[in-house]
Image: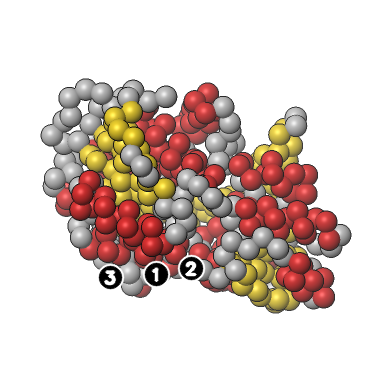
Amino acid sequence: MFKSIKTILAAGVVIAATGAAHAEGVKVGMITTLSGGGSGLGIDVRDGFMLAVKQSGRDDIEVVIEDDQRKPDVAVQLADKMIQSDQVDILTGIIWSNLAMAVVPAAVNQGKIYLSPNAGPSQLAGQGCNPNYFNVAWQNDNLHEAAGGYATSAGYERSFILAPNYPAGQDALTGYKRYFKGELAGEVYTKLGQTDYAAEIAQIRASDADSVFFFLPGGMGIAFMKQFADSGIDLPVVGPAFSFDQGILQAVGDAALGVKNTSQWSKDIDNPANKAFVESFEAEYGRLPSLYASQGFDTANLMISAMEKADIGDLDAFRAALKEADFDSVRGDFAFASNNHPIQDIYVREVIKEGDVLTNKIVSVGLEDHSNAYVDQCGM
């Protein structure tokens, strides 16, 4: 798939292009989830990132890829190895916010740049912001804020809301409540990795909710939606894209049809960069891209755009080049707020069928040129 595989390691791979290394080349350490629950998310981030590297044609990018197994202690060990032994210039790849909180602060304080293709915990957007940390996906609250705004506009007055009890789950419910103007029929934090939702569904049934909002990424969302559909409860469901994205919909099945979900990306965004990305990703990997794949792709292209303007050895210049975000995002308009998190549109999508394939289509813009609630807490 790529020009050469340089080395295969016990716990990961090093992928590099052939040809003489340039003095201004960049070595990237990617720590992501490639096995166990949630592995599809990490695989998509990796594949999107590596597609952009391949398309760039550059021979001066080396990527070390390791599997964090969705374990914070493993992620920390991998980060230490990459910084101290592999001597990477840039870290990226982490899916889960609890892993990001375990890795990112120490990494950026050691002078390493971290480009987040997914996790965007509020702690790193506010007082924990850092000039070496750039989030290329969103701040965790963002998609949930748009969901809360949509639920309000749809006339829902009593939402039952649930999410896993970890940083991204806490940010999710905070974001929803920030924009939802009704009352809560219930608010529940589940266990991270939970797959049996009988108790929570019983609580929903007993409540007087007129809608359900949930953030349960990966296999958690698949399990919940299947069990919720089987319960016979007839309430509209709203969620972020994480539980209704391309890689998940086929597992959820027709139970997801008609669900409104929020995302900063969709395969039907009408711009040349996105059309080319969707076509090339499907040609390369034999599947439609997901939200996570789009984020990996944009993260690599942001990095490549900075490499075209500055040497990684001049950290101030390289950071300034990153801040300019001078690349064609698959999302369309993209800029960084002062805390290095995106300013972008957040869309409302509906789950539909195209032939036999479940997918999403944009039905409206939920939040336009949206930043995040933590900018003023960041001292940069």
Which residue shows up at 69% across the image and 44% down it?
251
Q: Dot 3, crowdedness within 10 Å: few (<14), some or many (≥20)? A: few
Which residue shows up at 26% across the image and 34% down it?
61
x and y percentages locating residue 62 in the rendered image = 27, 36
Q: Looking at this view, is 109 or 347 the one in front? A: 109
Which residue was labeled with disc 3? 379
Which residue was labeled with disc 2? 167
Q: Between disc 3 and disc 1, whose residue precedes? A: 1
Residue 33 appears in view? yes
The quadrant the N terminus occupies is top left
Q: Secondary structure at mark 1?
A: helix
Assess whether mark 1 and mark 2 are in contact (beta carbons under 8 angstroms): yes
Which residue was labeled with disc 1? 123
Up the image or down, 283 lies above or below 42; here it is above
The quadrant the C terminus occupies is bottom left
Which residue shows up at 30% across the image and 55% down it?
79
